[in-house]
Amino acid sequence: MIALYIRLSLADEDISSEKEESNSIVNQRELLYDVVKEHPEFVGDEVEEFVDDGYSGMNFDRPAFQKMLMLIRQRTVTVVIVKDFSRFGRDYVEVGDYMERVFPFLGVRFIAVTDGYDSVAHQIGDDKDLEIIIKNIVNSYYSKDLSEKILTTVRAKRRRGEYVYSGRPFGYLEDPENPAKIVIDKEAGQYVRSMFDMALKGWDTRMIAHKMNDLEIPTPNEYNQLHQIKGKWGRLTKGEHIFWDSQKVVRILSDPVYAGAYVSAKHVRIVAGKKKTRAATPEEQIWMYDHHEAIVTMEEFEKAQEVFRPKANHFVLPYKRNPLKGKIVCGTCNYTMVYQERKVMDCFYMCSCTYKTNLDFGCSKERIPEGMINDIVFRQLKLWFQVLHQIDGRLKEEEKQRFEQMQETAKEVSRVQKILNGLQNKKVALYEDYSEGKLGREAFISKRDVIAEEIAGVKEQVNELHRKENEIRNGKRKRKGEFEELIQRIDIFQNEIILTRTMTEAFLDKVIVYDKFHIEIRWAWQDLIADMGLLEEVDEEMRTAAHKQMEQEAAAETDAEAEEKEVAAV
């Protein structure tokens, strides 16, 4: 497959009309299709577009690029064509890494049209090497410089007290007379005020959340969608239901914006153009008091913080990095289950809806012991390790047989090709004899027709062998390289005796819990297994392995009971 990669960042539209036109999606697309037509070796190849519209070139966390990269790793994409290096990326280190290491390793041909680069024709030490390096450095510098200018502008607006966030806090609206200012939303502002009032009465965050649910007050998400407001909490929820919980209450009670203070620059971008940030120090933050109309006084705001801040003598249990954190969801409401850590007794999981709210969505109210669910996941994981190793062994044998078939077919093609070459030489010699008068016309025609018939038969054999060769080559399992990488990761954890966070991050997608007796485990490799056509084979192997495991456990229990009886008899 030929991949046409097209990228247009938001910044490109701010440079000039000429640049916008040259870099537009339409113009890039036309240019790349013209290149495909100009290369005869691309005739008949599948062509697919990968378009990232509105994404920075300073990082590669772009949806279309990541999709293209996945197909490259699967050996589906063999050619990548871009308008120029800057469309591919502006980080010269990473761009160079793809050009010099990643693409050559994966056998991918890379073409940057207007930069005159084609990896097939390029040689190491070429005169163009220095030009390529300079272009990539210039692209990187340009993007960083532009990013710094934008940040400088944003900082200046913050210092002037202008509100620069895309969404407004719940309880506030954009000032219709000045978009850089905010004003109180009368309806939502009353909801916020009532939450602070409850906190000032000593209610904890869970009690406040229950009351908000009882009064059927919409959450910030619901309210913003209902009134078509672009708010800070306008994201869709993971579960089917939306409700107030302690976390939402804390978000509001802890935000000084409700006391009239504007706090900006809470996070600092570590590298210009990159998404990675760090928390800003107090000196780096910008605080402006009496910036806008407050819903509560600063004294009320400070007092409300006592509701969720731990007391000085309050015992806080040290955080335990549970291996299934964030991986267990309720099968009824689809929310991530709450992990409750206890000092003495076994820790447990509970449905968020059941634990955090007073609402009933039909979810199980059971406490799922951590030890029980960890054991289930670990035992299943070990079974999968065993089965996947067995499948890997068969795939290697299959690959060995395929290689042997390829070698045999290649030998046969070589043998038949020699016969074909001999017949063609014989045909040439026959014509020479005829042209020199050594052979009469009728004899020449008769012998020529016989040789032609033989050549046609041998050519059909060659074509059939080539078809067989292609069938064997195409018989290779899809995503075989990814499966081999999976086996390598499994080997790292093969001898683990307990479930660890590293293991679940590497192999587990999620655990869906309906109740103690109905638990579904989804593994990260299930799509890979399906794409390779191994589902039925793996299911059968898993049933066999599980049955064998049960027999071994039953036998071990019988031996243990017999040993206890012998000890008792003694």
Image (cartoon, grey):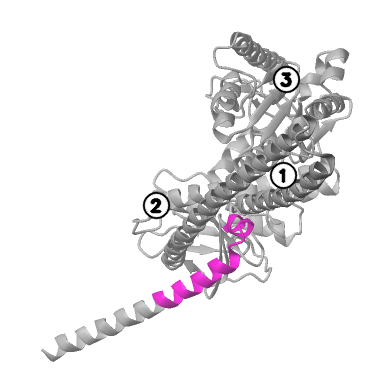
Q: Is residue 229 left or right of residue 400?
A: right
Quadrant where the N terminus is found in the figure = top right
Which of the marked residues, 1 or 3, is nearer the chain's N terminus? Answer: 3
Amino acid carrying label 2: it is Asp
Q: CA distance from mark 1 to mark 2?
A: 57 Å
Amino acid carrying label 1: it is Arg
**Numbered range of the magenta stretch:** 526-549
Amino acid carrying label 3: it is Asp
- 1 or 3: mark nearer the eye: 3
Which is the main secondary structure of the residues drawn in magenta? helix
| Residue 229 on image: x %, y % | 83, 41
| Residue 348 on image: x %, y % | 47, 63
Residue 227 highlighted magenta (yes or no):
no
Quadrant where the C terminus is found in the figure = bottom left
What's the residue at 53%, 49% (across, down)? 407
What's the residue at 70%, 14% (across, down)? 146
Q: Which residue is mark 3?
A: 84
In the image shown, does 429 or 268 lie closer to the viewer?
429
What's the residue at 82%, 44% (across, down)? 445
| Residue 130 on image: x %, y % | 59, 9
Q: Which residue is mark 1?
A: 193
What's the residue at 72%, 44% (across, down)? 193
Q: Is residue 502 left or right of residue 186?
A: left
